[in-house]
Image (tube, rainbow, N blue to C red):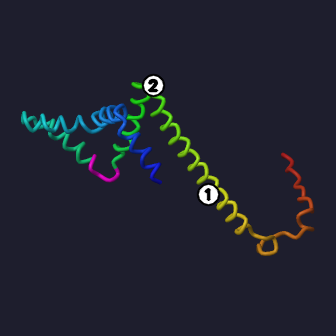
Amino acid sequence: MKQKIIKVLQFITNPRFLLCFGLGWIITNGWSYILFALGMALDIGWMKAVAGAYLAFLWLPISPEKIATCAIAIALLRWLFPNDQKTLAVLRDILNKAKAAVRSKKEQHQAKKAEKAALEEPRPEETPNAQTPAEETQPAPEIEPEQPM
């Protein structure tokens, strides 16, 4: 556990990642704080309204900006620092672990679903409209087409 914490802290406190995270934060959130400050300082109503509305959205629990900020930071890290193999290796490791976790959850879900379907499968003797084996093998009666007049 201690090793995981140290690895995560090293990843987060990497100066290259911090730079990219700062740029990602400015792209997703920072512009609205700057715009709001300018609107307040210069008394421009539309700036205050736009920035205030976006800031209100950011503080909602359903706001996806944190996910977007991290995604932008990772994309910037890969774009600006393609030779930083240590940080990119940590990202690949995290991605592979996430994929493995999702894959195992899917397998567990499918196993539960199959188990539930096997338990709920009706038996022929229990179904009210079940046909007897003799009825199943009898051919359907043929209907002769009507002759045109």
What kind of secondary structure does the magenta stretch mostly adopt? Answer: loop
Q: Residues within 10 Å of mark 1 (few under 14, many from 20)?
A: few
Mark linked to residue 82: 2
Towards the viewer: 60 or 90: 90
Q: Position of residue 108 (x, y in %)?
A: 63, 57
Please identify the quarter of the rendering in which residue 123 is found: bottom right
Mark linked to residue 109: 1
Please identify the quarter of the rendering in which residue 51 is found: top left
Q: Is residue 128 magenta?
A: no
Of mark 1 and mark 2, the one earlier in the sequence is 2
Name the side, left or right, on which 45 lies relative to 96.
Answer: left
Q: Give the residue displayed 48% in from the left and 38% down from the top.
A: 90
Tags 1 and 2 touching, CB below 8 Å: no
Q: Position of residue 39 (x, y in %)?
A: 12, 36
Q: Give the residue displayed 44% in from the left and 44% down from the top.
A: 7
Residue type (three-letter) at the residue carrying disc 2: Pro
Residue type (three-letter) at the residue carrying disc 1: His
Residue span colored magenta? 58-62
Count of marks, rendered view:
2
